[in-house]
Every structure is written in C-alpha cells, then in structure tokens.
Amino acid sequence: MKKLLLSLIISTIAIQAFAQGNSYKQGTGKFEGLAMTPPMGWNSWNTFATNIDEKLVKETADIMVSSGMAAAGYNYIVLDDGWMAKERDENGNLVADPIKFPNGMKVLIDYVHSKGLKFGLYNCAGTRTCAGYPGTRGFEYQDARFYANLGIDFLKYDWCNTAGINAPEAYATMSNALKTAGRPIVFSLCEWGDNNPWDWAKPIGNLWRISGDIYPCFDCEFKHPENWSSWGFMKIVEMRKDIRKFSGPDHWNDFDMMEVGNEMTGIEDRSHFAMWCMMASPLIAGNDFRKMKPETLAILTNKNLIAINQDKLGIQGFKLTVEDGVEVWVKPLSDGAWALTFLNRTELAKKINFDWKKNSIKDVDFGYEADFNKTIFKIKDLWKNKEVGTTKKNFTADIVPHDVITLKLIP
C-alpha cells in the first residue's frame, strides 16, 4: 500500500511538472516595427544570379550613396543565392564562398554599414537553396545565431527543396529562431504565394512574396525548361485577387524585386515602378547600378512616386475602372489625398477623357471614399511634378501603349 501511495505521489508530481513545462511559452514571432513602410533597397538576383562577389557589393553600396538612391530611401543591400560555400564547415556553420568573398562576410557587412546602409542575406527553408547551396532545414537556430553575430539586418528566406515540409511551421521556426538570436532582422518570406502566406504570415514575417519570380517584360509569361514560369510585372499585379486587405505596415504583400533598368523600354520601366508604388510593394531594385542610365535613376528616385509607396497609411491600391483598355488604379493616402494611375494595357495609343463625377471612389476593404460630386480635388501630375487643374473638369490626356499617368488628388 505504501509503495502504491508513493508511486501515485511520484506520478502526480511528474504529471504536474510535465504540464508546467508544456505551459511555458517561449517568446515567438517576428521583430515588430521593422518595416512600417515597404522596405527599399537592392537585391543581386535579377541581374547577377549567383555571379556575385565582394567587389560588386562594395561598388553597389558606393553607388547607392553617391547616386542619391540612399537619400531617396534605398537602404538595404541584399545578397541573394550563391554567397555561400557549397558545404557547411565541420561545426555545421555556414561559410561565405572564399573565392567570391576572400575577406569573409563580416568585413563586407561592416563596409556596407559604414556607408549608412543595411545588409541582408539569403537562405532557404529546404535542405538546399534553389541554386544548390546549403539550406537551413534542421539548422534554423544555429543559422539565426550566425546571422545575428554577422550583424545582418534582413533575411530573405526561399522555398526550394522543401518536399514534405509544412510552410507555416517552417517559416514560424525560422522566425522564432531569429527572435531567439536577439538581433532585429527583417524577415522576408519567399514561398511564392503557393501556401497563401497572407492568411498566416503576419505574426511571422514583415513581408511575403505573392508570386513566382518576376521577368523583365510588361505582361508576358516566360516558361523555363524545368517546368516553371517567371512573370511579367503586370501578370504579377493581376495574379492574386482579394489579398490587398492582408497587407499593411509591417506586413506587406511583396510583388518581387523590380526589373526597372533590365531590358524593358523606358516607358515600361515607368509603368513598372508606378505600379509597385501603387501596390505598396517593397521597392527592391534589381539592376546593375554600375551601368545604370540616367533615365533609370530618375525613375527609381522619383520622390513623388516614392512618397506614394512610402505613405504611412500603408494601404495597397486597387483597380477602379477599365475603359477601352485603359485601367484606372487608385490608392488612399494618409493626408486625405488619393493616388490615381492611368495605365494603358494595350498596344495602341489612347485618349483619356475621365469624368470625375461619374467615377467616385469607394474602397470596400478599408472604408475610404472620394465623392467628386461633393469634394473638389486639386490634381498634381507626379511624373511632370506640376499641378494640372482640378476635378471640376474632366481629365483629358493622350497615353501611349504601356505607359502610365500618375496623379495625386488633393482635397
């Protein structure tokens, strides 16, 4: 009987201890408040793929500062896939490729920081990255400590080689690992929208990709031999329906790195940039700064457009109307104004004759409205940087194929 009683006491203590242990909750989730406006910067992938090295990064950082891009708000330099050696070291740590980065990653990061910029790295939730370098699966907490010790500020986290892995769990694990490591790092989820991250990623990451990779064209699909596609920028804009309500300060729908300056026409570059600003997407340049034309720099540093993207209200725009192939996109702003973009989706020049009184705006997701019968707005052309009348009269203009006209409506 005494043995039975002792056994029952021990069992009860063990159950209580187990219950107490399981009721302890470790601090989880992303670092809050790191991306209250869409992040701005540069990523190496679109132009260079894995052909990256220390010299490229330093030159890019130098030009980001000297060209005025840093002053315009671009402050992240993110090294994408290919920065690592092909295998981890004997302790399981990631190692920078010694050929590409002979002085190691810490020296390079310190250089970027010395320019007043921030630094980001890439890895992948799978066993290998998309280019075949060591993935983070099973090394999440070790890698998070490695990133914190390096002093990075941004982590792009991809989704290749992830068979059998649950996306919300994998991304939550890495998010928690970053939090535990203790250094505030912007966490960028890159699982291409396959698992509807807008439904679950807000407490996990600061931004999440909504599509597969972008391609430098207006509205095409580029089919790769490996049976996947890259997408023209308007394909990405139109790809997801009804997700704008999930985007906002510190939890952004990410429409991918930009292709401005990469193979498209200057007109298409303007349209691409305008739509990324209207959609409140992160503005991550993907061109070669060393070969950047003045026209490209002027687009990327247009202060009027950047102000639309960086508006503190943080609301993604939406399509209001389509008439004769000309779309009208609108975005509410924090000062009671609206951004409005006319976009010619066709291959023909068009004439715009927009009757404000017949096209009042109602944002059903966020509750903002503009009734042009009740309120008169001043109109500023954000590309020409000048006032062009009011909403008392119809707005008339000619617009060439694939071009945009972006206005700010000021009450």
Image (tube, grey):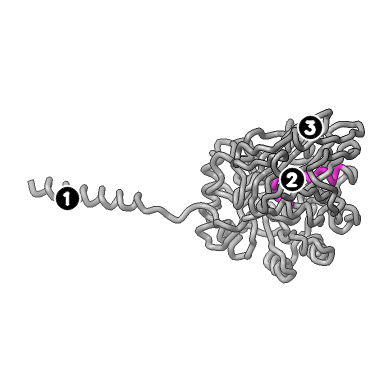
Would residue 228 be found to the left or right of residue 66 on screen? left
Q: Name the residue under label 3.
A: 223
Residue 280 percent across, percent down from the top left: 69, 47
Q: What stretch is highlighted in magenta?
A: 268-283
- Packing grade of label 1 (10 A; few <14, some 14-19, many >=20) is few
Residue 69 percent across, percent down from the top left: 80, 61
Rendering quarter of residue 365: top right
Q: How far apart are marks 3 and 1 (CA)?
A: 67 Å
Residue at image point 76% right, 41% down: 214
Q: How far apart are marks 2 and 3 (CA)?
A: 47 Å
Would residue 303 be found to the left or right of residue 294 on screen? left
**Image quarter of the N terminus:** top left
Element assignment for label 1? helix
Element assignment for label 2? loop
Closer mark to the observer between disc 1 and disc 2: 2
Residue at image point 54% right, 44% down: 170
Q: Main secondary structure of the magenta part?
A: helix
Q: Tell me, for residue 118, which label it has, or none.
A: none
Type of amino acid under label 2: Ile
Check if mark 3's residue and mark 1's residue have beta carbons within 8 Å. Answer: no
Type of amino acid under label 3: Lys
Q: Mark 2 points at which residue?
A: 376
N-terminal label among 3 and 1: 1
Q: Is residue 158 visible?
A: no
Q: Mark 1 points at which residue?
A: 9
Element assignment for label 3? strand
